[in-house]
Amino acid sequence: MTKLSNLEFDAAHIWHPYTSVSNPPLLHEVTSAKGVRLTLADGREVVDGMSSWWSAIHGYNHPKLNEAAHQQIDTMSHVMFGGLTHEPAVNLARKLVEITDDSLQYVFLADSGSVSVEVAIKMAIQYWFAQNKPEKHRLLTFRNGYHGDTFGAMSVCDPVNGMHKMFEKVLPTHLFAAAPECRDDADWQDSYIEDFKHLVEKHHHELAAVIVEPLVQGAGGMRIYCAEYLRQIRALCDEYHILLIFDEIATGFGRTGSLFAYEQAGIVPDIICMGKALTGGYMTLAAVMCNQQVADGIAADGSGVLMHGPTFMANPLACRVAAASIDLLLESDWQTQVSTIENSLNTELTKYRDHELVKDVRVKGAIGVVELKKPLDDAMDWLPGFIVEQGVWIRPFRTMIYIMPPYIIDTADLQLLCDAIFHILNALNSTER
Ligand code: PMP
């Protein structure tokens, strides 16, 4: 039997994110990565505009993260967390407690972003159960949100985007307020929060928590919104006794210009989820943190245990790399890096605002989004190849061409990414005609 090439075997046997085996996606094989560059199997190098979905903030193959991983492999790659603890977990938790608000004191180390959302939801439901209020078990969120693909996480994803439609009948029914629209605090009007407020007033007796992605709704549309929403939500949660969960899985660790997005609103959630850039994109690890009130509240129930405990919880290898990644971030001049990227994206991408295919251009921190008037679905048979020919790695999604590069990207490589977007727009224009 002839051996299939990697790409052939992949097409015949492997699922990629959100793909069908009957129509395998067009793939590029990547063999190595260093700094902001990915090397493909055919020898080409491309500048990474995606940070592997928000995570590789320091770029790839970083000597300090490699060293942390090597040292930990030589010591202990994994050990169960039930009945045992270890320095990598304690060290990471110490750092997380240090870099977040003083009120966030307890850490649960989960194994992926979606699982951290599950844990946050469980925390909120268990909290009210322990307060003898089991009727407070529903969640309120914004439309256009995305929190992951596991069942609890899916239940708080926007039901109208259709992604999880086939599971509708088996998902818990939560509440969805109109998606945030206002991008600038200066343009704020109280009418923006009215739908949300109305749902809180009507349903607070059954609401365990509000869950939102602060400042940027990611996979649900790369929508950027202003901090005033978060202040209003915090006030409503306080007034009506509802816990507040921030999903900072995408926004955490500097991406929006502050270490965590909540800092820009001057308020703090009761529970926060983080993942993605937690390990600098090296390992699968996520964390949920909560305040004393939530932790004590859960403990108030009979046995008071938090009902979650995955096998790879607090994996020492991942924790060690995460601690090294946080050190690397704090030792770097990430604020300047992110604001330099933000300035360049503002200058370069807003040039395309009047392009005939473009509906909107949005920039926040190290995130740049060009939203098109029409979905890109028909172009997906040639676009990935065309993008790589431009010497970059960008992965358009629905109507969006967006970039969120590693913070270490230099001006020339960032320009290459912005120019590539321009070439993509022109190529789309010529295929339209
Ligand atoms: N929440 C947000 C805001 C996300 O962007 C993602 C990942 N796209 C998740 C949750 C789920 O994280 P993971 O893919 O690690 O399960």
Image (cartoon, rainbow, N blue to C red):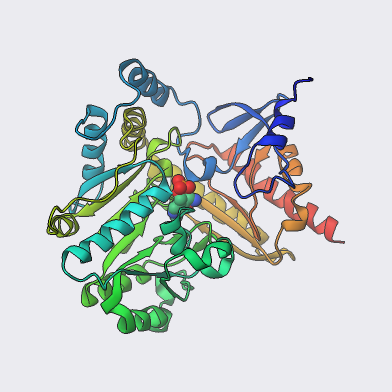
**Looking at the image, which residue is at 62% across and 42% down?**
16
- Report x, y in % for residue 176: 44, 73
Q: Is residue 25 above or below residue 1?
A: below
Which picture quadrant has residue 230? bottom left
- Report x, y in % for residue 38: 61, 31
- Report x, y in % for residue 268: 26, 60
Left/right placement of residue 114 relative to residue 387 reads: left
Q: Nearer the viewer, residue 211 or 424?
A: 211
- Report x, y in % for residue 26: 73, 41
Q: Nearer the viewer, residue 359 or 311?
A: 311
**Looking at the image, which residue is at 74% across and 47% down?**
22
**Looking at the image, which residue is at 30% across and 68% down?**
137
Q: Nearer the viewer, residue 74 or 400?
A: 74
Q: Residue furthest right?
A: 433
**Looking at the image, which residue is at 36% across and 54% down?**
118
Whether residue 405 is visible here, answered yes or no, is no
Q: Is residue 67 above or below residue 166?
A: above
Left/right placement of residue 325 relative to residue 366 reads: left
Left/right placement of residue 129 relative to residue 420 reads: left
The quadrant of the image that shows the C terminus is bottom right
The quadrant of the image that shows the N terminus is top right
Whether residue 120 is visible here, answered yes or no, is yes
Q: Is residue 360 above or below residue 377?
A: below
Number of numbered discs visible in the structure rendering: 0
